[in-house]
Image (cartoon, helix red, strand yellow):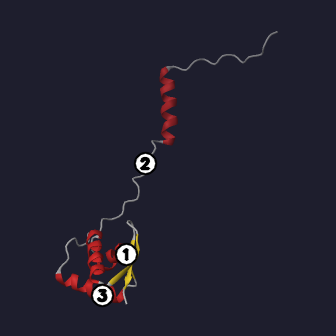
Amino acid sequence: MISAMPPKQPQKSKAQKALAAASSSRSKGKKKWSKGKVREKKNYAVVLSQAMKDDIFTNVPKKMKMITVYTMVEAYKINASVARRCIKELAAAGKIKCISNHSQMPIYTRSG
C-alpha cells in the first residue's frame, strides 16, 4: 500500500521565519492595559471653621431629613471623618436621633 502524501515543503530559513513572525505580530500589536477609572481627588475641608460649625449645627437638624456621613460630606464639602464627628456631637446634643446604628452605615434623622 502506497499512501498518497503531499511532497515535503522546503524548510524556511531563519531570516524568513523572523520576517514572518515580525509581520504577524505587527498587525495585532502589544496588548494595551487600561489604567482604570480614576476619580478626581476631592479637596474637602479637614478642619471646621467656627462659622461652618455653627452653620452645620443649626441647619442640619432643620433641613436634612436623612443624615448620613455621605450626605453631610456632599452638602458641606467636609471630610468624612469630620462629618462623623459632627454627627456624633449632634446626636449627643439630642438634635438628631439614630434610626440605624450599623457600623458601616449609621443613619440619623432630625428629632422632634
Question: What is the number of callouts on the image?
Answer: 3
Cα–Cα span, label 3 and label 2 = 47 Å
* Residue position for label 3: 59
Label 2 Cα neighbours within 10 Å, binned few <14 / some 14-19 / many ≥20: few
**Which quadrant, please, contains the C terminus?**
bottom left
State whether residue 6 is above or below residue 93.
above
Q: Could you tell me how far apart the alpha carbons at marks 3 and 1 are, in whole angstroms?
A: 14 Å
Residue 8's place in the image compared with 35, above or below, is above
Q: Which residue is mark 2?
A: 33
Q: Which residue is painted at 50% across and 35% down in the image? A: 23
Q: Amino acid at mark 3?
A: Asn
Q: Residue 96 at what x, y percent from top left?
A: 34, 83
Residue bearing mark 1: 68
Could you tell me if the residues under marks 3 and 2 are in contact, i.e. CB atoms within 8 Å?
no
SS of the residue under disc 3: helix
Mark 1 residue crowding within 10 angstroms, few (<14) / some (14–19) / many (20+): some
Q: In 3D space, how far apart are the residues under numbered discs 2 and 1 (Cα atoms)?
A: 37 Å
* Residue 58 x, y percent position in the rendering: 27, 88
Marks 2 & 1, CB-CB < 8 Å contact: no
